[in-house]
Image: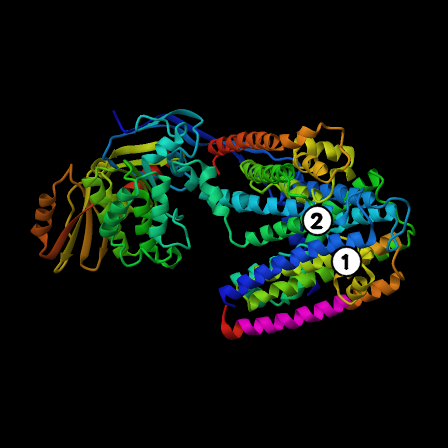
Amino acid sequence: MSYQKSYILELLGYFVVTGIDFAAIYFLFESFPAVKGWSLWEIVYLYGLGSSALAIAQLSGEVLEDMSLIIRNGEFDQVLIKPISPLLFLMPQSFRLDRFARLAQGVLASGFSFYYLNIIFSWTNVALFLCSFFSLIIIFISLFLANAATSFWTIQSSEVFNAFTYGGVEMSKFPLTIYKRWMQVLFLFFIPIGFVIFFPTSILFEKENLLNFPKFSAFLSPFIAIAFFGVIWVYWRVGIRHYQSTGS
Amino acid sequence: MLSIYLAFLEVSFKRQITYRIANWAGLFTNAFFLFFKVALFEAIYVGNEVVGGLNSTSAMAYAGLAQVLVMVIPQWGNIGVGEEIRSGQVAIDMCRPVNYYFLTMSKRLGISLYYVLMRAMPLAALGIFVGILIPFKNLAHIPLFIISVVMGSWIANSYHFLVETSAFWIENARGLKTLSTGIIYFLSGIILPINFFPVWAQNISRFLPFEYTINVPIQIYLGTGSNIFELMFFQLIWCLVMSAQCIWVLSKGENQLTVHGG
Amino acid sequence: MPLIRVENLKKEFRVHKTSGGMMNSVKGLFFSRGEVVNAVDDISFGIEKGEFVGYLGPNGAGKSTSIKMLTGILVPTSGDIVVGGITPYRDRKLNSKNIGVVFGQRTQLWWDLPPIDSYKLLGKIYRRPSKEIQLKIEFLTELLELQEFIKSPVRKLSLGQKMRCELAAALLHSPEILYLDEPTIGLDVVAKDSIRAFLTRLNETEKTTIILTTHDMGDVEKLCKRVIVIDSGKIIHDSSIERLRNRFGNHRVLEVEYDEFSEFSLPENVTTVKNIGNRFFYQFDSDKIKAPELIKRILEHNSISDLSLVDVDIEEVIRKIYHEKRTV
């Protein structure tokens, strides 16, 4: 099968998978009227937000998922020999054209939700969306980085951060209010996916606030995300240092 | 003959044990999804209504069970058959006095057995501890449940085998894999219980093998769905159908290999 | 002041042991034990600019561990390393600018791209002006004869071609020091010769300091002026290559083809190594008896049709060194 045909098949695969994701949400709302007060298109918005942010994060950080393989191959030594920060060297290699398919789905989903929910494109609303969007991208990249950093200690890649990344994306498709307290706390204060999505979005859709947080905390999202990245980045540097102490 | 397959099952089981850290990390992931899905299914019910035969309690139990079984009845593909065909390993297996399909199934059953110990049981304990999993309604159903799980695993693994044999003919099967995984994920009931599908979708699903992988064993456990024996009968049919298909495709593939080279 | 200075360098590793069997596998799920290994055990040496040093040792001797410490990949347990005035593992990026590394079995070139694309990218990574890189590429292409395949994807190249491209990649940024790890492994005779010629020229004209790890004694004989031998983490020999040859005495081998052999007594310090029909191989210590003297003795008793004189095999010397170390 020629390269082009298999490429088309791959794109088709992605679109079917998206269709399936959407069908699942759609079927759910056929059987149930709402999820804790959130309607179909509001959920679709969350879905679109999560998917597109993940897609962009993957475009820059996906190579980090292969970190344990890179270490095992001895390829990381090659990276250390170059006069460049390992991150700067590795991350651009994540760029893959087919990830755009997932990005497209996410953007489409968001777009549709805007339409069906009659969202006005005011400055505030755009700012709220962008807050969530960029913060989420940074958090996802941080999680990829954390996963990669863990590879310096265990040769087998640590699925723990995968749980947070892919699990995080899954759970972010539904409002934070449906989860148990401990899960809310986890995703508000420790892995702030919940923080950066819920507050801006609940303002956007005029939903009830959680824990009575002040409204401006929605705009704190980017700072929280960057702080989170900072912590993980330190972990990464510690990981490299550990690699240099113990060899491969 | 059977002893050879059993030996492979045992080896495959032992190999899995060596992945120490990945075990615990994977368990963590499963537990995470368990809590997430359960919370979701709790939230969508407002009162005590029954949708598709499930009320709030049984829906949560469904979610819990789905996670308990998700590794034992693999939805995620990538069972290694594709790589073995591409690398030529399959040619080596063809020189042995074994059937490659049954060999793969033995290995997969070994892995499933491992996951019963390392994932299903701890997760089940967790589910019972937090009060999500209700114990069996009818103890006599336990052996039936176990058989149903084994059959479900057989069907799922055969499906993945079938998809991966495309490697005999197709170079880059990534698109096919994505597509096929998406299909089984959706139609097996693990993302959304089949009970929550609109009726027309449920009718279509009934004629496909996917719901007989994980949805049916869960129904048997919960005591919902139609007659147990009817469900298990259909599972058996699908086991046979899938096996027949796999064996047939395999022989075509092996033919391809010997005629055209690796 | 040596360019590379290593003092009392030590590197310890913690190694996990796993025993087989079912119970141990399951135990391994919960506990894991380790023991300490001295990969590099108190080594010291200095290398001056422009030297061509062979770094030899059996597998597991500590060669790659030492090289990794020199290149900044690994942090020593104790001891000093100074390369070009800086500590490699502390100032990794600075050190990297000054070194080129070729790993025999692995490549730093991008697999699917032609080497020239990798070179351009590397040029950016080393922050060299593109004009400079352009000239360097042309220069190296000429020298290593890469013209034919520099635009073909790396995966399509033969081993010899790949190695030449690999060398070019390592030298693009004109490093002062070049580390080579088994560069001629798997190459045919012609390829080996061309690479050796290139390395000799590089060392002589550019004064690039070269440190070569190899198992190929041909490499050592033809290229290295100095040899350091390491075994079980310790240096067991460090000298010029002549001294290495003479370590066990100044042995030479005389090969003689007799017209017809008649028995005679050999002088002292001469042993018959082997004979094939009328062809005899004599080993002698040229400190104790000179070649002409031996030849005279032979001619006293026999007539010969051919003779040749060979210096002792380096490989033989190395083997003796390992053996000596083991039996001490």
Q: Quadrant of residue B252?
A: bottom right
Q: Residue B109 at what x, y percent from top left?
A: 70, 56
Can residue C312 be seen from the camera position used here? Answer: no
- Residue type of the residue flagged with mark 2: Val
Q: Which of the two residues, B108 or C163, is positioned nearer the viewer here?
A: C163
How packed mark 1 is, by other alpha carbons closer than 10 Å (few <14, some 14-19, many 20 or more), is some
Please name the residue that numbered disc 2 is placed on. Answer: A44
Q: Would residue A239 appear left or right of B222 to someone viewing this image? A: left
Identify the residue at image location x=69%, y=49%. Answer: A113
User: Which quarter shows the C terminus of chain C?
Assistant: top left
Q: Quadrant of residue A21?
A: bottom right
Please name the residue that numbered disc 1 is placed on. Answer: B150
Host chain of mark 2:
A
Q: Main secondary structure of the magenta part?
A: helix
Q: Nearer the viewer, mark 1 or mark 2?
A: 2
* Count of marks placed on residues: 2
Q: Residue A176 at what x, y percent from top left?
A: 74, 38
Q: Which of the two residues, B28 or A52, is positioned nearer the viewer here?
A: A52
Vertical position of residue C169 compared to residue C11: above or below: below
Tag 1–tag 2 contact (CB < 8 Å) = no
Q: Is residue B244 magenta?
A: yes
Q: Would residue C6 appear left or right of B170 to someone viewing this image? A: left
Q: Residue A32 at what x, y percent from top left?
A: 83, 50
Q: Is residue A231 magenta?
A: no
Vertical position of residue B251 compared to residue C42: above or below: below
Host chain of mark 1:
B
Q: Which of the two residues, C128 or B214, is positioned nearer the viewer here?
A: C128
Vertical position of residue C298 compared to residue B212: above or below: above
How packed mark 2 is, by other alpha carbons closer than 10 Å (few <14, some 14-19, many 20 or more), is many
- Residue type of the residue flagged with mark 1: Val
* Distance from Cα at disc 1 to Cα at disc 2: 37 Å
Q: Which residues are magenta?
A: B238-257
